[in-house]
């Protein structure tokens, strides 16, 4: 179930989800890794994919697969794991994702945000 479906069943949880939903995309736009990671970790119970979570790891997940790299979140502005990996201060995960899906570098969220925009705004990049 997504946040909208949960709103009627668990109003408090859905409200919490919508609050995080309103914060995660602006934090990615601003290049704030810590805020985006905190939001995503708290949104785990709202159908956030394993690939989205793996994008914040410092090491490449052995479960990372092509096809999941551009999957959009149902909430949070439709951001994909490749957007999250571009925010990661360690370039390892982004590099691994781009090896699996090179075209993902230009993958757009519904707002027009591309991973290259996120990487340029990244406040904590090692690169």
Image (cartoon, rainbow, N blue to C red):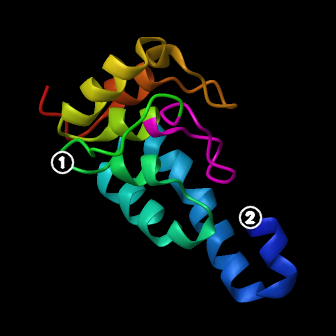
Left or right: 18, with 101 as reference point? right
The residue that appears at 18% across and 48% down in the rendered structure is: 58
Q: Is residue 71 magenta?
A: yes
* Whether label 2 touches label 1, CB < 8 Å: no
Q: Position of residue 4 (x, y in %)?
A: 81, 67
The residue that appears at 51% across and 23% down in the rendered structure is: 114
In the rendered structure, which disc, 2 or 1, sits on the residue that comes first in sequence?
A: 2
* Vertical side of 14 occupied by 35: above or below: above
SS category of the residue bearing label 2: loop
- The residue labelled by disc 2 is 2
* Vertical side of 66 occupied by 60: above or below: below
Residue 30 makes an appearance in the image: no
SS category of the residue bearing label 1: loop
Left or right: 71, with 124 as reference point? right
Residue 105 makes an appearance in the image: yes
- Residues drawn in magenta: 68-81
């Amino acid at each position: 179930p997504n946040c909208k479906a949960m709103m009627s069943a668990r109003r408090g949880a859905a409200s919490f989800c919508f609050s995080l939903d309103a914060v995660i995309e602006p934090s990615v736009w601003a290049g704030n890794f810590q805020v985006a990671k905190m939001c995503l970790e708290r949104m785990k119970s709202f159908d956030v994919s394993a690939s989205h979570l793996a994008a914040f790891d410092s090491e490449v997940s052995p479960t990372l697969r092509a096809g999941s790299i551009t999957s959009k979140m149902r909430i949070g502005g439709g951001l994909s794991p490749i957007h999250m990996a571009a925010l990661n201060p360690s370039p390892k995960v982004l590099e691994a994702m781009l090896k699996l899906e090179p075209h993902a570098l230009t993958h757009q969220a519904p707002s027009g945000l591309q991973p290259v925009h996120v990487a340029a705004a990244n406040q904590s990049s090692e690169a």
